[in-house]
Amino acid sequence: MADAATRIGDSALAERLGREIEGEVKFDAFTRGRYATDASIYQVEPIGVVIPKTENDLRAAVHIAEMEGIPLLPRGGGTSQCGQTVNTALVLDCTKYLRGITDYDEETHEVTVQPGIVLDHLNAWLKPKGRIYPVDISTSSRATIGGMAANNSCGGRSIHYGIMVDNVAAIDAILMDGTEARFDRVPGNIGELSGPARYRDLVQQIRAIAEREQGEIDANIPKLMRKVGGYNLDRVVARDAAGGHNMASLLVGSEGTLALSRRITLKTHAIPKHRVVGVCHFPTFHAAMENTQHLVTLKPFGVELIDRTMIELAREIPMFQAAMREFVAGEPDALLLVEFAGDEKDPLLAKLADLETMMADLGFPGAVVRAEDPGLQARITEVRQSGLNIMMSMKSDGKPVSFIEDCAVPLEHLADYTSRLTDVFTKHGTKGTWYAHASVGT
């Protein structure tokens, strides 16, 4: 009887959504089955799916969900591996229609986008302007800006550019009660704040919580660049020079639990004119992890890991074989891809020389393959960004399962952490493999 009642309730909800929404409303079993999965190992069937065509559709969906007591689940490309985009909820998928660029400020170089735009598509639009959005995650060909903001994505060059929360200037959001507000920088004196009364109350409440719990925040939030456990209250505590903070920082990393992002304003950066990469070879995985903390002192744009499993698998895949011969020498157990970038080439070549000297001083002379050619760099990047797909090509009775995503540890503990986790795998008769933004211990 409960199942029958649920079906009747879902039917009524679907009919109401269909009347009030211009976009697509899908409650059929096939669609719910498709949206029950993402890149994670989890499967949860949603109540139904709304594919909004306009921003008014977003408003209508929020209003109906609030009236009906239905949870909402905004969904991006479904590329995260911790199950963030599956749940018993009404899924909002903005990737089909709400993927536009709505504004670009020629003075500040900030760009405003709808949540469904894919990162690679945004960067293709920015490239003629000499700009880039630098949170360069490996799933950039399909991950959306809305999902990246919700996830507080990191990317390979975060040691230089910062992570998502550092590069979001503002979010135009809809609260569950339908209130619309622009979450951006608020002044030190909240009395100067404009906007809806509901938003002003929220700012006051959030600041009061942050001030009340400052001791706990300072003592217990890890001092890491890459941390996404809970809400970014530490950003509220860490006021700017004028005593203000940015409310958008609270929505970034909140996984859609606080508000629905209607538009997102991003900080763009100038595209460096030159890049070089040093491919550092290590005889053991432990050595690679142990020495990352030293390599980052050269201030690279990124340090990325390729471990032995990925090396061996990539060598068996025809599309990667030529590239692997170009940048992998001998039989290393792990590679660290150390990238430097800037507008002048000579200082970058000097950085490569410094890297070779450091590797020799660490006990690995002649262990750096220099990649100065942009074409080779692109081929190396393609291998690195295909990491999960390469892993899934493994031919064995058991298939690899990606289940620990974006776990971050201080660099001085990286070797110990990975060794201890390897011991856990061994204890249970299996093995693990790794890919990482090693520069920030992710």
Image: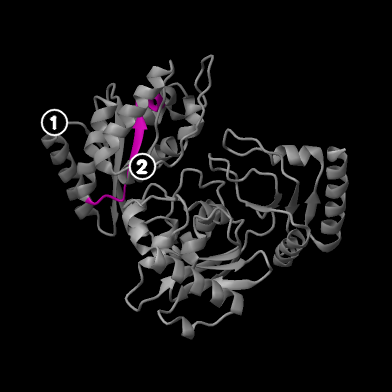
Left or right: where 280 falls relative to 9 = left
Q: Which residue, as the protein is rendered here, is positioned at the far left? A: 361
Q: Position of residue 219 (x, y in %)?
A: 32, 55
The residue under the point 27% across, 33% down is: 415
The residue under the point 40% across, 75% down is: 244
Q: CA distance from mark 2 to mark 1?
A: 26 Å
Residue 243 in sight from this viewpoint: yes
Q: Position of residue 397 (x, y in %)?
A: 54, 14
Helix, strand or loop at disc 1? loop
The residue under the point 65% across, 35% down is: 43
Query: Magenta span has 91?
Result: no
Instruction: Tell which of 325 and 79 is nearer to you.
Output: 79
Which numbered dot is residue 377?
Answer: 2
Quadrant of the snapshot with the C terminus? top left
Q: Is 45 above or below relative to 243?
A: above
> Which amino acid is tagged 1?
Gly
> Which amino acid is tagged 2?
Gln
> In this rendering, which labeled residue sits more in front, label 2 or label 1?
1
Local packing at callout 1 (Cα closer than 10 Å; few below 14, some 14-19, many 20+) is few
Instruction: Tell which of 314 and 251 is nearer to you.
Output: 251
Q: Position of residue 378 (x, y in %)?
A: 40, 42
Left or right: where 423 falls relative to 28 = left
Helix, strand or loop at disc 2? helix
Instruction: Tell which of 298 and 188 is nearer to you.
Output: 188
Please state the extent of the stretch shown in magenta in the rendering: 299-311
Q: Is 215 above or below relative to 358?
A: below
Local packing at callout 2 (Cα closer than 10 Å; few below 14, some 14-19, many 20+) is some
Which numbered dot is residue 363?
Answer: 1
In the rendered view, how is the structure colored? one colour
